[in-house]
Amino acid sequence: MSDLSLGGLATGMDTESIINQLVQLEQRPIYNYQQEISELEQTKGAWRDINSRLDNLENKLTDLKLSSTYNSRTASSSNEDVVTATAANSANEANYDITVNQVATAQRLIGARKTSFSAAADDVITLNGTDINISTGDSLGDISSKINDADSGYSTSVINEVLVIEAEKTGVENALLDGSDGSTPTVSDNNGILKELGILDTTNGYFTNEKAATDAKVEINGITGITSSSNEITEAVDSMTFNINPEAAANSTATISVAKDAGKATKAVQAFVDQYNSVMDFMNSKSGYDSETEEGGILQGDGTVMRLQMRLRELVTSKVKDSGAYKTLTSLGIEIDRDGVMSFDSAKFTEALENSPEEVMSIFNAESDSDGYNGMAVRMDSYLNQLMQSNTGLIPRKLDFYDTRIDSLNDDIEDVQRKVEMTRQRYVDQFAAMEEAISEMQSQQSWMMSQLSSMGGSTVSSMM
């Protein structure tokens, strides 16, 4: 039957084409469902992008809520080849004249040149309480590797067949002791290998060739006696860390100046402004109408988008508090024009921050429990959290709705496809039956014509 239906051998009809046309009518719901899914996917994609941009906006609010953003200090050096510094937020605004009398260095022990060295016997080297096992036949490279792997606080290298041991930290307190000054030795061996390598004196065990460790010694504003085992000095001045250049010359000088750092707050505000504009511009593009292309955005007419934009704009334009010199973002140089674009006057903001840092900070991060009102960053962060909270937030619920609807439409498509296949098979069977019936009729007709022809020939012959 199927062969007849596919080719229309009996009727001469293109039955396959006819069946496809009939089935196409049955498939119309699928096209409608697919169109709806496409629109839902675009809408879901737009809301997913909005959610991502709002998440970035919420991240920008984090710095605006931190007191450290507004209280930061900057420390500059008149000569960074001598010393640099970092200042904590609590550091005083002041100048520090630094004289570097001596930099901190690490101890270095230099052995003797040993060509093609090979350990004659097993030994144990002890470096400040850490034992390193040396095996018979170990080369200089083997010994160096074993010391480096021991995590003893000392590293080694082999230079021109000379073993060099060096403390990993600077300062006298991190140096190995050989007892030559009456102290308890902190370096030893059991079988004399360090003496053989020229690290220890063969007679009395003292270091043969030592570059001694030194502590850093500085003067700060004329105060002497300041020392450190490292070139980082943290205890001399509260909230200050001075970093001495290890290459600084003896008795070199520099001045460290500590001042308020408006740059950190300015960058944080600018980052917020840029992200706010990005969010609003994207929502405008998805909900607006393009008169040139005469096409509307995928979210055109979506009331949720319009309410979201209105709320965000309200949060940045409304008055934060009722008293003081600075009550709004506008008073700090943050404004929104008639097109909804936010701008930032950093000079105006910096001036306000210098005049009243605590008040400027409160415009952003005040909290009602302690200040009686919430700052803009606190308010907006709370609002965005409600929007994007997993499972309960407005946007996640929207995305879940679209996913559920798309899944339902895909199920509908599968149902229609099953029905279409059943309909197609029914048409195939019907056309096959028709072809078979017509084929039988044609066969019967041919047989009858053959019989009639045969009868006609016999009559003529008998008459003759």
Image: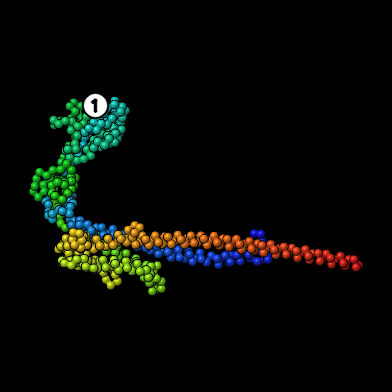
Number of marks in the image? 1
Residue neighbourhood size for the residue with mark 1, other residues' Cα within 10 Å, grouped as few (<14), some (14–19), many (≥20)? few
Coordinates of residue 264 in the picture (x, y in percent): 22, 58
Residue 362 visible to the viewer: no
The answer to which of 262 and 374 lies nearer the viewer is 374
Compared to residue 220, the image places residue 352 above or below, namely below
Q: Secondary structure at mark 1?
A: loop
Coordinates of residue 54 in the picture (x, y in percent): 31, 61
Q: Measuring 21% from the left and 31% from the top, which residue is drawn there? A: 187
Tag 1: amino acid: Asn
Is residue 420 toward the left or the right of residue 135 in the image? right
Q: Measuring 74% from the left and 63% from the top, which residue is drawn there? A: 443
Coordinates of residue 211 in the picture (x, y in percent): 18, 37
Coordinates of residue 25 in the picture (x, y in percent): 55, 67
Residue labelled with disc 1: 190
Q: Measuring 32% from the left and 66% from the top, which residue is drawn there? A: 308
Compared to residue 183, the image places residue 258 above or below, namely below
Q: Measuring 29% from the left and 25% from the top, which residue is drawn there? A: 121
The answer to which of 145 and 363 lies nearer the viewer is 363
The answer to which of 54 and 138 lies nearer the viewer is 54
Which quadrant of the figure contains the N terminus?
Answer: bottom right
Residue 108 visible to the viewer: yes
